[in-house]
Image: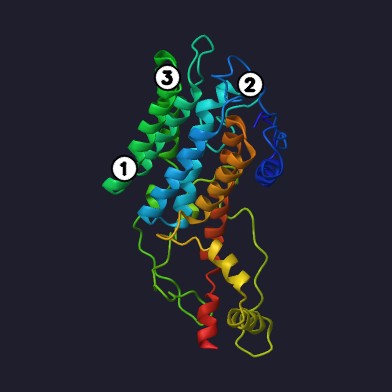
Amino acid sequence: MNDSTLSRRSFLTGVAGAVATAATTGATVAALPGTALASPAGPPSQSPTALPPDVANDWIETLYDVVLAEGLTPPNAARIYNYCTLAMYEAAVAGMPHHQSLGGQLAGLPSVPVARRSMPLDWPSAVSAAVATVAGTLFDEASDASRVRLADADAAQVAARRAARVPAPLLSAGRQHGQRVGEVVLRWMADDGYAGTVGLPYSPTAGPDRWRSTPPNFGTAIEPYWQDVRPMVLRGALEVEPEPHVPFSVEPGSRFHDQALAVYETSQLLTAEQRAIARFWTDNPRTSGLPSGHWMLIIAQVSRARGLRLDTALETYARVGIALHDAFLNCWAWKYRINLLRPISYVHDH
C-alpha cells in the first residue's frame, strides 16, 4: 500500500502473506509484498506502530456478532467487512509513516482526510470513530438490539481510552478525524451500485442442469444481481474466469456422474475429523458471521496470539477485506452466469 505502482496481482497475493506471516511470526511481522511496515514515530502512546490491535479486533468481533444477528447474505457481509476495515485503516494511516492511503488507488475512492501533523491525536479513537460512522449507515435498518450493540462498542472504546488516561484533547481530535474519514468512505460507498440490486425480481432458468432451490430451507436465489456492485481492484466482476465445469450428463460413468457419485459416497463415510472440519467451515446465515467474518476472526485470533501491532493488524484487515469483497463479487457473477444445479439436486435425481 506504500507504492502507487503496486500491481493488482501482487496486492492480492499479499493477502495470503498477511495471514500466513502473522500466523508464523511474532510482533516483528515482515512487510507484505509491495509494502513497508511502519516504524515507530512520535510518542509510543500515540503511534499505531507501537499500539496493540485491541480496537480493531474488538470492532471485528462486534461486526461479526451483528452480521450473525441480522442474517445477512454472504456477498453483502463481505461488502460490509470491506468498508469497515477500509475505514479503520484510513483513519490511522496518517500515523503509519511508511504506509499510504488507498485514496486514488481503489476504484473511485477519492482522497481521504489526512490528520494534520501539527495536531496530535489518539489513533485508536480515530479508528473506532471511523468504523462506528460507517457501520452506523451500513446497519441503519438493523434491529434495535444490533444498533445498540454497535453504539455500546463505540462507547466501550471511548471508556477504554479514558481509562488509559489519554488526554481529552487527543481523544477528541482522534474521534473528529475518524468521523471525517468515515464520512468520506460513506459518500464513496453510496454509489457502489448496491442499492440498485436490492429487491429486483429474479426468475431462474429451468432445465435438468439448472439451479433450483434446495433443502433444507428451500430458499430463494441469493443476490442474483451482485455483479453490478463496484469492485475494489478488479476491472469488472467477470474478470477472473473459472475453468469450465465438466459437461453435464446423467449417464453412469460420465465425468459429471462420477463427480456427483464421489460426493455422495464420501458423505456416507465421513470420519469424525471430516465432520469436524466441515462444521468448522459451515458459515451459513444466522448461524455465523458468514465466510468473510470467519476469516476476519482468524486475523483477530492470530493478532492476539502473536502480539501484532495495530498498524500490522489494520493493514491485514484491509487487504483481506478488499480481497474478500472482490472474491465474492467475482464468484457471484459467475455463479449466476453458469447457473449449474447443486450436487444435492443431482444426487436426489440420479
Tell me the number on the disc at residue 171. 3
Which residue is at 39% across, 27% downward? 158
The disc, 3 or 2, on the residue closer to the chain's N-terminal end is: 2
Q: Of residues 235 and 232, which is closer to you in this image? A: 232
Secondary structure state at the residue bearing disc 1: helix
Residue 274 in view (yes/no): yes
The disc, 1 or 2, on the residue closer to the chain's N-terminal end is: 2
Q: What amino acid is found at the position of numbered circle 1 in the picture?
A: Arg
Q: Does the residue at mark 1 contact the one at mark 2 (Cβ under 8 Å)?
A: no
Q: Quadrant of the C terminus?
A: bottom right
Local crowd at mark 2 within 10 Å, few (<14), some, or many (≥20)? some
Secondary structure state at the residue bearing disc 2: loop
Between tags 3 and 2, which lies in front? 3
Mark pair 1, 2: CA separation:
35 Å
Asked if residue 198 lies left or right of residue 237, the reply is left
Which residue is at 70% across, 35% downward? 29
Q: Does the residue at mark 3 contact the one at mark 1 (Cβ under 8 Å)?
A: no
Asked if residue 58 lies left or right of residue 29, the reply is left
Asked if residue 89 lies left or right of residue 30, the reply is left
Which residue is at 52% across, 29% downward? 90
Q: Mark 2 points at which residue?
A: 97
Q: Mark 1 points at which residue?
A: 147
Whole-percent x and y of residue 291?
Answer: 52, 56
Tell me the number on the disc at residue 193. none
